[in-house]
Image (cartoon, rainbow, N blue to C red):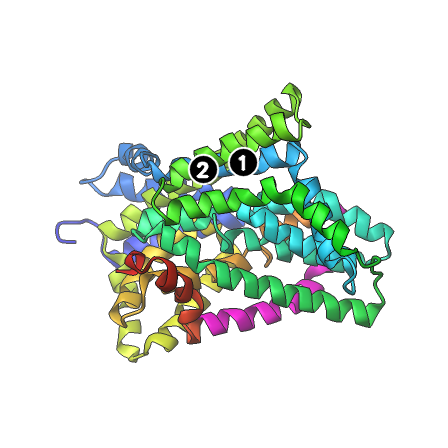
Amino acid sequence: MGGNVLAAGTAAQILFGVFFTLLVLRVPVAVALGLACLPILLIEPRLSPMMLAQETFNAYNSFILLAVPFFLLTANLMNTGGITDRLMHFARTLVGHFPGGLAQINVVLSFFFAGISGSSTADAASQSKLFIEAQRKEGYDDSFSVAITAVSAVLAVIIPPSILMIVWGGVLTVSIGALFLAGVVPGLLIAGVQMATVHAYAKARGYPTYPRSGLGEIFRSFLVSIPALATPLIIIGGKVFGWFTATESACIAVLYAGFLSLLVYREMDLKGLVGALGDTGRLAGVALFCVGTASAFGWLLAFYQIPQALLSNVQTWGMGPIGVGFFIAGVFLVVGCFLDAIPAIIIVGAILQPLAQGVGMDPVHFAMVGIVSLAFGLVTPPYGLCLMIACSVAGMRMADALRDTCIMLLPMLAVLAAIIVFPQVVLFLPNMISPEFLR
C-alpha cells in the first residue's frame, strides 16, 4: 500500500517471525497473535498500538459469535444433567455387539455429542473421562484408547452445529445454514471409517464385545434418548428453515438443555449449574480471545496486501478446482499442526479465499475442505489439543499414542480426498433441501 514505511514482504517477515518466535517460547497462541501485531503498529506512523484494541473489539462486536458460548453451555448442561449418560446407553444398544464394542460406543457417542456441542475440545474432555479408564479395565491398549477418543472428538467440528462453521460463516460471509447441511455427509463418512478402523483393530487384537441388545431394549433406550436426540434437530432445522438465526438457535438449545436437565431428567442441581457456567466461561474465553487477536493480525495482513503477494506465484501454476482443493487442504493440514483452528480460519481462510474464487470453487465446498483439513490439526503435534487432552487424562506421553493416531487418520484422509474430488459430497444436502443457500 502506497505511503507505508514497511513493504509487504518486510511486514510479513515481522508479523510471522515474531509470531512463530513466541510460539517456540511457548507463549499461548492468542497472546502471540496480539503481540506479533505490536512491532508493526509501533513502526508504521499511520497506525497506532490502540488499533490492536480497536480491531480486537470490532471482532467481538458480532451477533453471530454469541452462538459460541451458548453452544458450549448447551454441551456442559447436557453433561451435567445426565443427558450424555442416556445417549451413551443408546449407543451401547446400537453398536455394543460390534467388535471393539466400547470403542464403537465411543465413536457413536462422539457423533451424537457433536450434534449438540460444536466443540471438539469439550468432546475430548468429556469422552476421555468416560472412556479411557473404562477401556483400560476391559483390556484395550492405552495408545489405542487415547487415539480413538481424540480422533472421534474431531467429529464435533465437522458435524453441525460446529463452532468452526459459525466462525467461518461470520468471517468469510458464507451461509451458516448451508455449512450446517454440508457437514452432515462428511461427518457420517468420517464416523463410518472410524468405526471400520475400530473393527479392524478389534479383530487384530481381540478386543471384547458386549452381548447383542434385543429390539425391545433398543426401542426403550431410543425412547429415553429422544429428547436429547431432538437437540441437533432443533438447532439445525431451525436455522435451515429460517425459524431463527444461528445465535438464536444456540440460545434455544441452552433453554432446551436446561429444561431437560432440570425438569425432565432432574439430575442437575444448583452446584452443577454453577459448574457448567464456569466451564463454559473458561472455554468461551479462550476461543473468543483467539478470535479477537487473530482478527487484528488478519487486518494487518490485509492492510499490507500480504495475501495478494503470497498468492501471486501460486495463481501462475494454472491449477484447476481439484488441484486448488488439494493445495488448500495441504495448507490447512500444515497450519493446523501449529495453530488453533479459529485463528487459522480468520488468517489463512482469508488468504486462500481469492484463490478458491479464482477457479470457481463453491464457497461452501471451500469452507468444508478447510474445516475438515483443520480437524486433523486437533490430533497432530505439536498443537494437537484433543490428543493432548486425552493423553493428559490417560497419564501418557503424546509420542506414545502417535502411531495409532496416525493409522486412524489415514482413512479420514481418504474421505478428505473424496470431498475435494467430488464436491457433491458436501453440496448434495444444501442443493436438495435449501438451494437458495448456495446462490
Q: In the image, 425: left or right of 277?
A: left
Q: Position of residue 400 (x, y in %)?
A: 74, 59
Q: Which residue is mark 2?
A: 250
Q: Secondary structure at mark 1?
A: helix
- The label number, if any, that marks residue 74 in the structure image: 1
Q: Residues within 10 Å of mark 2 (few under 14, many from 20)?
A: many
Q: In this picture, which residue range is highlighted in magenta?
A: 393-419
Q: Residue at x 61, y 46 (%)?
A: 123
Magenta span has 417? yes
Q: Secondary structure at mark 2?
A: helix
Magenta span has 356? no
Going by the numbered disc 2, the residue's amino acid type is Ala
Q: Residue at x 46, y 58 (%)?
A: 183
Residue sitting farthest toward the front: 216
Looking at the picture, does residue 98 appear above or below residue 77?
Answer: below
Q: In the image, 325: left or right of 312?
A: right
Going by the numbered disc 1, the residue's amino acid type is Thr
Looking at the picture, does residue 109 appear above or below residue 257?
Answer: below
**Magenta span dominant secondary structure:** helix
Numbered label tally: 2
The quadrant where residue 85 appears: top right
Residue 275 visible in image: no
Q: Residue at x 49, y 73 (%)?
A: 417
